[in-house]
Amino acid sequence: MAPLRGAKRRKRHPEKALPAGVMAPLPPPDAADWWDSFSRRLAAGHYSKDCQNFESVFKMSRKTFDYICTLITGDFSRKTQGFRNFRFGDKTILALEDQVAVALLRLTTGESLLSIGNRFGMNHSAISNITWKFIESLEDHAISHLKWPDPEEMATIKAKFEKLQGLPNCCGAIDTTHILMCSSAQPNSNVWLDCENRNSMVLQAVVDPDMRFRDVVSGWPGSMDDSCILRTSGFYKLCEKGGRLDGQMELPGEPAGSVVREYIIGDTGYPLLPWLMTPYQERDLSPAKAAFNKQHAAARMVVQGAMARLKERWQVLKGELWRPDKHRLPRIIYACCLLTNIMIDLGDTHRERAPASHDHDDGYYQQFSNVADDGAVAQRDVLCQFVSRLGSKLPE
C-alpha cells in the first residue's frame, strides 16, 4: 500500500512497542481520498455528522483499522479474485479498505444485510459474501490475538488479580452469555429454546484482568446450563488432565503447607473444582467468608464487563439476530472476540468506553450448582483465610 500523497513531513515521536507477535500496520493508502469517498457513500440517504468521522462510524482508531487491513491484505488480493469484482452501485470496484469497512459496518452496527446494501447500491448477498470472507481471513491471520497466556503473561495476570482483589494465583474469570436468535430460524426445534423461552446460542469465555478474551467456546444451544457447557468444553478437559491451571503457589504468611493450585473464578452456576473457585452459597456467612465473596464478586466484574462490552461494541451480537446460521454464528462470535482483543493489544482507547450496565444477560436468572470437589472446598477455605487476613490492605 502506498504512503499518503502530499503529506507534510512532521517531527517523529517514538512510539510504544507493540506486544510480541503483533505486526506493525503498513503505511495507510491514500487515506484521505479513501475515507472521503467511502464516507460520502455512507452518508447517502442517511446523512449525519457522525458519517464524516471515522471513529464515530467504526468505534475504533485508524491505527487499528489499518492494522486489520494489513493482517488480511494477502487473502483479499491473492486468495479469491472475487474480492476484486465487488462493485458499488456506480460500478466502482471496492478496494481492500472498502471491503473491510463494509464488513466492520455489519458487525459494528448490526444493521441488516439489506439495509447496508441499500446504502451502497449493492445486493445483500454481496454484503454477506464480503463479511464472511472477512471473518474467514481473521480466523486465519488474527489467531495470535486470542490465545492462552504463556508463563510470562500468566505471571502478570496473577499479579494483577492479587493486587486488585487479593486473590493469589488467580488466572482468569469465566462466564457465559446468550446470543439471541430469531425463532423462525430454527423451526420445529426446542433445543435452542432457553430457560427464558428465547431461542439463543451460548458463548462461554475466560478473560484476564484487562478484559482480554483468553479462551472462548460457542455453538451450544441456550437450553444447556453453564455447568453442562463447561464440562463439554475443551477447556474443561485440558484443566482436568493438567494441561492448564496445574501450577501451585505457597501462600505467604500462612502456615507451612498452605498451597493453592492455579485457578479461575466463576459464579454460583459453576461447580466448585480445584481449578475453579466459586463463592460460598450458605446463609449467615462468617465475616471471613463474606469478605471472600466480596472480593470474589469484585474480581468477576472483569468477565461481566468484557461480555457487556462485547455486545455493546459489536451490535450484531446484541438483540435478536435475523435468520442466523447456527454453523456460522459461532464463527461470527469468535471474530468479534478477535477484533476486541486486537483493539486491546493495540491500546485502542475506543474499546475503553464502558457500557451503561455490566448486565450482559438481561432477563436471565442466576444459575446454581451444588457440585463441590472435596479438595476444592479445602482450597477455597485456605484462600478465604488469606483474603480475610489481607483485610484493609485491599483497594476499595
Image (cartoon, rainbow, N blue to C red):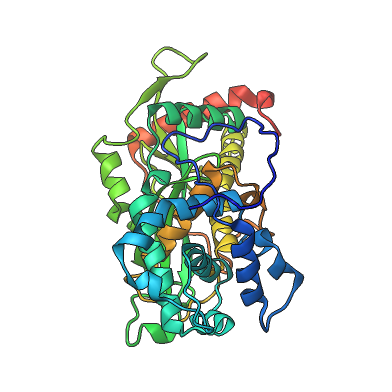
Residue at image x 76%, y 70%?
A: 49
- On screen, residue 328 versus residue 24, left or right, reads left
Give the x, y percent position of residue 123: 46, 85
Residue 194 location, quadrant = bottom left
Q: Is residue 277 above or below residue 327?
A: above
Residue 272 location, quadrant = top left
- In what quadrant of the picture does the C terminus appear? top right
Give the x, y percent position of residue 15: 61, 33
Residue at image x 35%, y 65%?
A: 219
Give the x, y percent position of residue 100: 49, 64
Q: Is residue 214 above or below residue 121?
A: above
Name the residue nearer the viewer: 263 or 14: 14
- On screen, residue 300 versus residue 370, left or right, reads right
Residue at image x 39%, y 75%?
A: 85
Residue 154 location, quadrant = top left
User: In the displayed image of the protein, which residue is found farthest to the right?
Assistant: 49
User: In the displayed image of the protein, which residue is found farthest to the left?
Assistant: 241
| Residue 222 seen in render | no
Name the residue nearer the viewer: 107 or 25: 25
- On screen, residue 206 versus residue 303, left or right, reads left
Give the x, y percent position of residue 290: 60, 38
